[in-house]
Amino acid sequence: MRKLLTIALALMLVLGIPAAAFAADDPSNWAKAEVDKAIGLDLVPEGLQADYQSAITREGFCVLIMSLGNYFDSVVAGEDSVTSAPFNDTENESVTAAFKLGIVNGKAEGIFDPAGMITRQEAAAMLTRAAKAYGADIGAGASDFSDYGAVAAWAKSSVDFVAANGVMSGVGDNIFSPVGAYTREQSILTVLRLYNVIEGETGKPVISEQPASAAVAVNDSVTLSVSAKGGGNGDLTYQWFKTKDPVNRVSDDIQIIGNEGTFIPPTSTDGAKIDGATESAYAPPTNIPGVESYYVEVSNGEAKTASAAATVAVKPSKSNGFSDPVKILFVCGGNTGRSPMAKAITEEVFKERGISAIIDSAGSDIIEGDTAEENAIALMAERGLDLTGHVAKWWTPQMLQDADLVLVMSESHKNRLNVPTLNIYSDKIFLLREYVGDSGSVPDPFGQPMEAYIETANILTDAAEKLADIISKQ
């Protein structure tokens, strides 16, 4: 019975294509023609030309994705943004190349899990990122799968793209099955279909070398550049833009590997045109400290392709002390519990101690419009502090620029600030408890009983008193 259920499940997970009888090592009847075509196009490495109906591993899917063409080789051959082996558990060249292109993330710090099985939503995300890296238009309207609500937030736009372009479909009955397993033959077919989508856009210029992010000192020169090839009969023209938002704060687009970080900058289709920036290379201004991101549109006279965005971070001069009043920014994840409580408590302690300060709070992973948590509001009210008007807000590079101190609740929050800004503010970003001489993170009470909020508030109060001692001595 278990064997029959396993076979039935494999059949259900195909890309909306009816299944038929099969031999274990060969492609299913419904898949054979497309598998043969993919092999003929050199899209299937020899090591994956067997066990077609078995589940594909994360590493195997990377190898398959990276077979799409020499385009990827030319990108990876450029300047490296990470070490040659970014993960501790694999040195596979395809995994490293896919990571450099922003196609894959690790499962945890330094961990890729190469032998782990890939899920359908993970496959959708990797396919979409590959399409983006190749220069395809990945915009698509929302899918209408009945289980769309079960798709992870980081994968929704990817599911939209693969569904809209016929790269992946559901498993039947309008169900996508986001955490369902994925087989080799399904993977081969989707890579072939993605190849067809990309080849169908040959009328557009293809960008073979993307602009690279850089951190520089004030007034140091930096040049962003792209390499592109035709797609049409006319000469290529270029127009550079500055993105609307200088950083991308979406959690899934930030990858932390050991002490290094790489990230996907903001979406490169929503920006302000830069007058006169009409060459393949552009030297952005670096006379003012801060963070900005830029991209270029390449046109062949018939169609346009937008490059990935590149971030330029201009490091401010090192401060010789705190301003008066001292400016402090508290950051947690959702900006609904720990950081607004830290702000309220610290303001009260500083007021009692006669310390002049401008204190604010923000989040690294917020939901727009969220208010303070009910337990946080109630607890602060007992202490005479008011959080009823608090609304969660994102951190911004300008907040980091303006602050004397940025105090975060956990190590992950430091990463969420340092990585997108290329570490130019790292000398002012600290774990709150470590800065005041303690150790560890401030525990997150979200979703827990009032006792957890009381514990966190007590830790924040103790930290505020110690912080006041430090500031008073400056």
Image: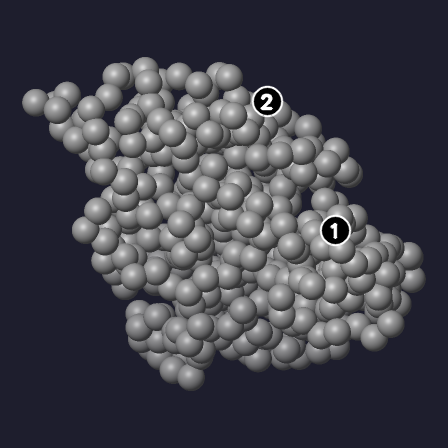
On the rendered structure, is 388 left or right of 310? left
Disc 1 marks a residue whose amino acid type is: Gly
Mark 1 / mark 2, whichever is N-terminal:
2
Q: Badges 1 and 2: C-beta atoms under 8 Å apart?
A: no
Disc 2 marks a residue whose amino acid type is: Glu
467, above or below 20, in the image: below
Residue at horizontal 42%, vertical 65%? Answer: 141
Residue at horizontal 62%, vertical 34%? Answer: 69
- The residue carrying pointer 1 sits among few (fewer than 14), some (14 to 19) or many (20 or more) residues within 10 Å by Cα, namely some
106, above or below 388, in the image: above
Farthest residue toward the left?
Answer: 1
Q: Which residue is mark 2?
A: 91
293, above or below 106, in the image: below
Give whichever of 408, 143 is nearer the camera: 143
Residue 268 appears at what percent x and percent y?
64, 62
Residue at horizontal 74%, vertical 64%? Answer: 301
Q: Secondary structure at mark 2?
A: loop
Q: Secondary structure at mark 1?
A: loop
Question: Visible in this render: residue 43?
Answer: yes
Residue at horizontal 61%, vertical 31%? Answer: 96
- The residue carrying pointer 2 sits among few (fewer than 14), some (14 to 19) or many (20 or more) residues within 10 Å by Cα, namely few
Residue 114 appears at what percent x and percent y?
47, 26
Question: Visible in this render: residue 405?
Answer: no
Residue 112 appears at what percent x and percent y?
50, 31
Q: Which residue is mark 1?
A: 230
Image depth: mark 1 or mark 2 in front: 1
How many numbered badges does the structure rendering display? 2
Residue 25 appears at what percent x and percent y?
32, 15
